[in-house]
């Protein structure tokens, strides 16, 4: 800090840190504060890849492995039958592939033990898939891309900034672990204070790391002004239980009197009343973003079905190309 006029005390309130405690005296703690990430509120969006999300990647890989194994076993069985009965089956690979797909999608029947077992397994897979998929695409869900520091530094869509001269700025500047260090090195700049930056944050210009009291006050202002919620607070705290107090000149004669006043204000409940008056109208905005849709169940639109439709279109295109190829090959044989 550069030279400047000497003052007896500063209201702040300020976060108490060992570095600050060396150059000034702090009053009795006014309250404890948590810090989190404040950003624009996530909204409901269609997901073209949503039809793949009823199962995890591991389950999809296991299903693919089971289909391949079933195909291999069926090829072996048909060849074994041809050897026993001295017959010959043409196009065995193609026929087996079609049979396995039809059995898996509940379109075929058979009388063998292997067929029955596979049909039962496919019944479980497809019934579970259809039920979960229906629930996922009709009941609104919101993807929250940033809910922790790890999420923040792992994405490039939303820049973030730190409050200039704040306790958090110094905290991340001196951090040694990779995630917190990347918060400091990857920030897109600073801002004066969270309250002054509330409109820019609500417009999605950047995310900010702020104290929760200020964030709730910004939410209250936003809802009171627009009747809507445009801000979201991450579920993970960036910093917990920071002590907030007033700062005094070392050995200030005002400090004992200020401590008595702070104790009286806290014990009488006046401080809690003051804070509550500043953060009214936050209950709706503190709910999960999925609660923003009031009607609960959403009708399906074209975007919701875009993924399956694209898969169907790709399959039809592949089938058409194969049909054209077969016709050309048959025509070529006739000419020769």
Image (spheres, grey):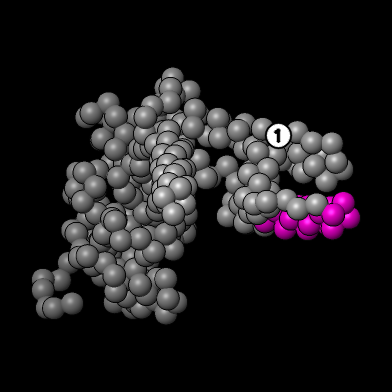
**Does the segment drawn in magenta span residue 71?**
yes
Question: Magenta stretch: dominant SS?
Answer: helix
Report the front residue among 91 and 70.
91
Percent position (x, y) of residue 99?
A: 68, 43
59 to 221, vertically: above or below? below
> Would residue 15 be seen by someone viewing this image from the given angle?
no
Name which residue lies at 47% across and 51% down: 333
Residue positioned most to the top: 295
Residue positioned most to the front: 336
Residues rendered magenta in the picture: 67-86
Name which residue lies at 60% across and 46% down: 55
- Which quadrant holds the N terminus? bottom left
Name the residue carrying label 1.
108
Percent position (x, y) of residue 34?
A: 43, 55
Percent position (x, y) of residue 236?
A: 47, 54
Compared across the picture, whether 77 is left or right of 105 comes to right
Q: Quadrant of residue 202?
A: top left
Report the front residue among 277 and 115.
115
Compared across the picture, whether 125 is left or right of 151 comes to right
Residue positioned most to the left: 4
Name which residue lies at 31% across and 34% down: 229
Percent position (x, y) of residue 249?
A: 26, 70
> Would residue 56 be seen by someone viewing this image from the given angle?
yes
**Does the segment drawn in magenta span residue 28?**
no
Q: Which type of secondary structure does the marked residue at label 1 adopt? A: loop
Q: How crowded is mark 1: few (under 14 residues within 10 Å), some or many (20 or more)?
A: some
């Amino acid at each position: 800090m550069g030279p400047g006029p000497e003052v007896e005390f500063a209201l702040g309130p300020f976060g108490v840190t060992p570095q600050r405690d060396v150059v000034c005296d702090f009053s009795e703690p006014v309250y404890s504060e948590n810090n989190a990430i404040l950003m624009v509120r996530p909204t409901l969006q269609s997901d073209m890849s949503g039809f793949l999300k009823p199962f995890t990647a591991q389950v999809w890989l296991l299903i693919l492995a089971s289909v391949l194994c079933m195909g291999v076993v069926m090829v072996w069985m048909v060849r074994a039958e041809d050897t026993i009965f001295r017959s010959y089956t043409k196009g065995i690979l193609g026929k087996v592939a079609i049979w396995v797909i039809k059995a898996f999608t509940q379109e075929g029947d058979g009388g063998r033990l292997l067929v029955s077992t596979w049909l039962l397994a496919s019944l479980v897979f497809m019934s579970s898939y259809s039920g979960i998929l229906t629930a996922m695409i009709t009941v609104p869900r919101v993807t929250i891309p940033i809910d922790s520091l790890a999420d923040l530094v792992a994405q490039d869509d939303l820049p973030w900034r730190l409050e200039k001269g704040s306790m958090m700025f110094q905290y991340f500047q001196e951090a040694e672990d990779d995630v917190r260090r990347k918060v400091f090195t990857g920030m897109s700049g600073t801002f004066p204070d969270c309250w002054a930056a509330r409109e820019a944050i609500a417009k999605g210009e950047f995310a900010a790391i702020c104290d929760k009291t200020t964030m709730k006050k910004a939410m209250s202002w936003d809802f009171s002004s627009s009747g809507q919620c445009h801000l979201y607070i991450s579920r993970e705290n960036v910093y917990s239980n920071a002590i907030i107090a007033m700062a005094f000149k070392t050995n200030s004669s005002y400090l004992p009197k200020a401590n008595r006043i702070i104790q009286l204000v806290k014990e009488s409940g006046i401080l809690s009343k003051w804070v509550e008056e500043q953060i009214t109208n936050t209950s709706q905005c503190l709910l999960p973003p999925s609660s923003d849709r009031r009607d609960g169940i959403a009708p399906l639109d074209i975007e919701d079905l875009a993924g399956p439709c694209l898969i169907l279109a790709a399959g039809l295109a592949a089938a058409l190309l194969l049909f054209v190829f077969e016709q050309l090959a048959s025509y070529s044989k006739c000419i020769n």
